[in-house]
Every structure is written in structure tokens, then in C-alpha cells.
Amino acid sequence: MVNVYIIVSIILALIISGWFYHRGRTRKNIERYGPLALFHTSRGIEFIEKVSNLSPLFWKVFSTVGIIVAFIFMLDIAVGMYFSAKTILETPTAIAGAVIILPGLEVMGIRIPVFGWLAGIIVLLFAHEFAHGIIARAEKIRVLSVGALFLGFLPIGAFVKPDEEHLKRVKTVKQLRIFAVGSFVNILISVTIVALIVFALLPAATASINGIKLTKVDKNGAAYSAGLRETMQITHLDDIEIKDWAHFINTWEEKNYSASENVKFTTYEGEFITVTLADRGDGKGKAGIVFCGKGIEKINYPVQFLAPFILLQQQQFCQSSENTNAATFWFGYEILVWIAIINFGIGLVNLLPIKPLDGGLMMESIIRRMVRSKSISNKIVIGISLFFLLLLLINIVGPHIRTLLSAL
């Protein structure tokens, strides 16, 4: 297991060494802002031009749909961040509402794999930025350059740079199309991958499982103490027949189990095992199991539908197709899962009304259309941006600061 301190040390070394390396060099295609370095190139502009010219009308309709989707998710994440921050401030045991995704760190108890993270970031950046460029050209706005953003030697972003002076002069709807399409494409990629996993990959790999199959049982957890073990198949939860793994998750959420509550699991062999749930940190019950099962019948609400896929890591005990190499299948599955998670999660956060995020730029376009005074509109944009930046910081570090203070 990779030590988190080693990962942090490597990241810091890449940032500091890269910063000093770039400081001593002057190149026309590089802009430097402290440790940040922006590399500009004209490569890729021709590709953007060709794709945008395939059907400018299609891209305009596509990005108009993106505006609607982006505003829906902007409202969703804004409200979610507010109530999550409120809970963190009011509840000492509340968990973080947002996490920083870096390889080696843990999300919901699962360590983020390097290859999955790398694949997710590459797909995220190129899809997001090229989408901006394609719609800009469809709207007849010149693309000046494309490039990459480095923090020291650490690649952290890609960008497409349009003619900003021209962009400021075009109609609001055109600006919104360009700003919204990046996150819209990221969310679309995520939904497509999830649909592929749900309706094709998982049913093919787990078709013979009844209910759910335990792939991991925490030896220090409540389920292990009660007698549940890896490879066991659970067919009933408190006398409710389990159809597939999504049905299990939905049933668990509907029951809303509390810590210390007794839950009856029924195995495929007909054995009844009662588990006294542990506290997961917020007063809710935790069994300490990881599982897989049949493909699901529907996709849950977008904000929640990615969480179950994190729980399906390390599934080497699941029933695989005879024509499928299990190790290869689950490695590819893990890559796809993290591409979906990173594209959805970061694409969603990018829609927060915080300038210079895309959501903040969309907000600014609307406010400037409604408020003619530039000074007043700027103050409104800054105020909203600072408010939601504060909410985001509370969601990320709030519980950790509370834990640190309680330990002093």
C-alpha cells in the first residue's frame, strides 16, 4: 500500500522543482504565474476547426441543450453544497461533502488507483477543453491557441484559448453555449460509461449471482463479527428479497439504518445472520461489506448514482463470463469507473457559480445581461463567487479542521 506521505512528498517535489526550472527560462509559448506555467501551441486548432465544420447547426443545438443541463446541475450542486456545509457546521460527526481526488488517497474507503485517476484526468481535460473550442468555432469565434497548464512539473489542466475580446461582444446565449458545453460533455461521458457498465458489462460478468455476492468483509467490522464472509450470497435483507445490487442499495437507503440497529441478512443457503451495525461516523449504521451483483434496472438520480460504483472495486470473487479473463475485465472496469467518477465529479464542481469556473462565467454572463452597471455586476459576481468558494472549502476541510481542533 502506497503511503500517502510519500505521494504528497512526490507531488511537492514536482511542484517546487518545476517552479525553479521554469523560472530561469524565457520562451514565447510559455506564460508563468508563480508555480503555474501555461504552455501554448497551435497544434490541435486544425482538428477543432474540422470537427466544428462538420455541422455547425448540430453543435449549436447540442450546446443549447448543454446550457439547460448545466443550469440544472448548477442549481443542484449549489443547493447541495449549502446544506452539506450547514450539516458540517452543526454536526460534530458530519463527513466531508467534497473530496480532493488524487491517486493514493481514499474515497469512501477505496484507494484511488493511479491508472484510473490518470485515465480519468486525461479524458476529462481533453473532452472538456476541446468541447469549448469546437463550440467557439461553431459560433465563429477564433481559437488563438490550445495548451496545457502545469503546476511545477505536475500537469493539472488543459485549455483552449478563444479570442476573449470577441467573446465578450457576442450575444449572451453564444457565451453560455461555450461556457456550458465543457461540463455538459464531461457529464455526458460519465452517464454513457455508467450506462455501458450497467446494461452491458456488469450483467455479462455477474449474471449468475442471486441477490448480491460479498467480495470483501471488513475483519474489524460488524458483519464479520456476526459471521458474514467473502463469497457469501445475500438474497434477503430483513425479509425483503434482493433482486440485484442496486435494489440492495436502495433498500438499505430506504431503511435508513442507525448505528447499533440489528439487521437480518439471509444467505443463498437459507442461513439467517443478524448484524448489529456499527457507527459510520454520522450516527448511521455500517455493516462493513463490499459486494457485487446482477445488473441494475435503472440509473438512480445523477448526484447519487456514481457512489455505488466506488463500492464495486476489487471484485475478483464475482462470477465472470467463461470468455472473460477476470483480472483483465476488472482492471478495465476499474479504469472505466474512475473515468466516470472523475468526469462527473469535477464536471459538476466546475458548474459551481465561482468565477473563473465555467459555472461562474455563466453566472457572470447572466448578471451582466440583467445589470447594466459594470461596477455593480462585478460586485455581485465577486460576492456570489466568494460565498460559494467558502461553502466549497467548508465541504472539503470542515470536518478535518473540527477533528484537528478536538484533538488539541
Image (cartoon, rainbow, N blue to C red):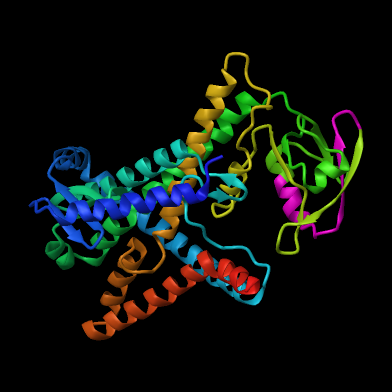
Q: Which residue shows up at 85% across the image and 34% down it?
A: 267
Measured along the vertical axis of the image, is residue 263 above or below residue 35? above
Would residue 265 be counted in the magenta stretch? yes
- Report the magenta residues as a range: 249-270
Q: Nearer the viewer, residue 305 or 390?
A: 390
Q: Is 354 left, or right, of 246 in this rendering?
A: left
Q: Position of residue 20 (x, y in %)?
A: 22, 55
Choose between 9 and 255: the one closer to the eye.
9
- Expressed as whole percent of the image width and height from the top left, the position of residue 320 reads 64, 21
Residue 166 spot, x, y in % from top left: 12, 62
Q: Is residue 369 left or right of residue 256?
A: left
232 shown above or below 347: above
- Residue 393 within the magenta-colored segment of the rendering: no
Q: Residue at x 85, y 30 (%)?
A: 268
Q: Is residue 266 left or right of residue 42?
A: right
Using the rendered view, name the quadrant where residue 180 is placed: bottom left
Q: Residue 228: image x %, image y %?
A: 83, 38
